[in-house]
Image (cartoon, rainbow, N blue to C red):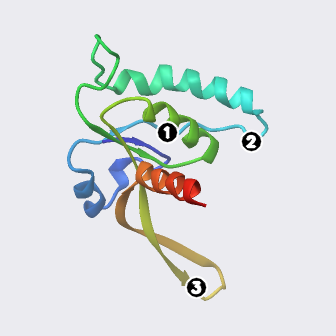
């Protein structure tokens, strides 16, 4: 699994590591400037994919496709994630997943709240998008 998020797998729970199914390659989520235009974001993400994602993919030199199926855990800024997901969707053998959690909130004596997120599962992102696309065709 390739983990593209702000949460390094070294800090994942044993349950999340087990669900990842083996080796996790961490590719840190970049800082995305909220003032960028769509064009600036696209240009940044294109370069980020070239410099950060492609080097960790085991691509077949004949067709530039991954040699083996691989899961991409993709969490973070929505525009960034959408563009990375669109790139990954063009490759065969790529499964995009996101993590689901349960938020457990504790209110402290001083009124401050502390939230702890407990991992539940990895959910395939593409399967939901495909279902929504099919739903849109029916409406």
Mark number for residue 110? none
* Cα distance in 3D space between marks 2 and 1: 19 Å
Secondary structure state at the residue bearing disc 3: strand
Image quarter for residue 17?
Answer: bottom left
Q: Is residue 47 left or right of residue 66?
A: right
Q: Nearer the viewer, residue 124 or 121?
A: 124
Mark 1 nearby-residue class (10 Å; few <14, some 14–19, many ≥20) = some
Q: Which residue position holds label 3?
A: 107
First reached walking from the N terminus: tag 1 or tag 3: 1
Other residues around mark 3 within 10 Å, as few (<14) / some (14–19) / many (≥20): few
The part of the image, by quadrant, that contains residue 123 is bottom left
**Picture quarter containing residue 34?**
top right
Q: Nearer the viewer, mark 3 or mark 2?
A: 2
Q: Mark 1 falls on what kind of element?
A: helix
Q: Which of the two labelled residues, at mark 2 and mark 1, occupies the earlier sequence position?
A: 2
Determine the residue positioned at 35% across, 26% down: 56
Report, in whole angstroms, how far the alpha carbon at label 3 lies from the one at label 2.
31 Å
What residue appears at the point 22 percent right and 31 percent down from the top-left corner? Answer: 68
Packing grade of label 2 (10 A; few <14, some 14-19, many >=20) is few
Q: Where is residue 42 drawn, in percent x and y?
A: 65, 28
What residue does disc 1 label? 85
Instruction: Single out the mark in the foreground, 1 or 3.
Output: 1
Distance of label 1 from label 3 (alpha carbons): 37 Å
At a point 49% along the width and 51% down the height, the residue shown is 129
Q: Which residue is mark 2?
A: 34
Residue 133 lies, with reference to residue 72, above or below; the image says below
Quadrant containing the N terminus in the rendered view: top left
Which element carries disc 2, helix, strand or loop? loop
The answer to whether residue 110 is left or right of residue 30 is right
């Amino acid at each position: 699994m390739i983990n593209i998020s702000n949460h390094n797998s070294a800090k994942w729970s044993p349950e999340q590591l087990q669900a990842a199914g083996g080796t996790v390659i961490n590719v840190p989520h970049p800082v995305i400037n909220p003032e960028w235009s769509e064009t600036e974001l696209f240009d940044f993400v294109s370069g980020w994919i070239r410099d950060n994602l492609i080097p960790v993919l085991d691509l077949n030199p004949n067709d530039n496709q991954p040699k083996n199926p691989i899961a991409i855990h993709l969490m973070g800024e929505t525009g960034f994630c959408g563009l990375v997901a669109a790139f990954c969707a063009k490759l065969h053998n790529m499964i995009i997943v996101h993590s689901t959690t349960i938020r457990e909130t504790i209110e402290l004596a001083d009124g401050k709240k502390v939230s702890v997120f407990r991992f539940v599962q990895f959910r395939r992102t593409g399967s939901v998008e495909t279902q929504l696309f099919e739903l849109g065709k029916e409406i």
